[in-house]
Image (cartoon, rainbow, N blue to C red):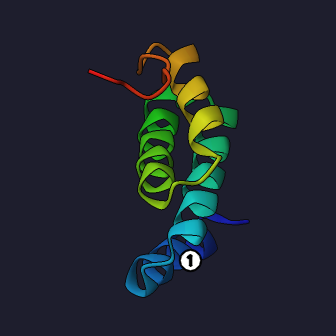
Amino acid sequence: MDRATLDAGLLQAHADHDLPGLITLYTQAADQAEAAGDIDAACFFLTQAFVFALEDGAPEAIPLNQRLVTHGRAHPITGPRHD
């Protein structure tokens, strides 16, 4: 997907409060940035996807977190806390 189409999709997904769409589109943006060698941008997009995945309770949260961990940008998710 070209950048303009991706940006338009992100804007529409935000307007629609489409969490699954936001997860998918931010992940695609991260993939494109990572492929271009722009790790800072990739991690920004991964963080956005991760936050929306957490908000949605989506299973994508785990692999998104792992990608951020791989880049040294997050700590691994652990199980539920029972403090």
**Residue 71: horizontal and vertical position, in percent?**
52, 17
Q: Is residue 34 left or right of residue 83?
A: right
The amino acid pointed to by label 1 is Gly
Q: Crowding at label 1, few (<14), some or many (≥20) Cα neighbours within 10 Å?
A: some
Q: Residue at x 54, y 55 (%)?
A: 26
Front in this rendered view, residue 57 or 49: 57
Secondary element type, mark 1? helix
Q: Is residue 2 left or right of residue 4?
A: right
Q: Quadrant of the N terminus?
A: bottom right
Q: What is the number of callouts on the image?
A: 1
Judged left or right of residue 47, residue 26 is: right
Query: Is 56 rendered above or below residue 46?
Result: below
Outermost residue on the front side: it is: 82
Please provide percent x and percent y for residue 11.
44, 78
Residue 49, horizontal then vertical, whole percent: 50, 50
Indicate the quadrant containing the C terminus: top left, top right, bottom left or bottom right.
top left
Question: Where residue 15 sits in the image (x, y, percent)?
Answer: 39, 85
Residue 75 lies in quadrant: top left
- Is 83 placed above or below 18 here? above
The residue singled out by tag 1 in the image is 9
- Residue at 59% across / 54% down in the picture? 58
Place residue 80 in its image quadrant. Answer: top left
Among the 4 quarters of the image, the one containing residue 63:
top right
Q: Residue at x 61, y 50 (%)?
A: 27
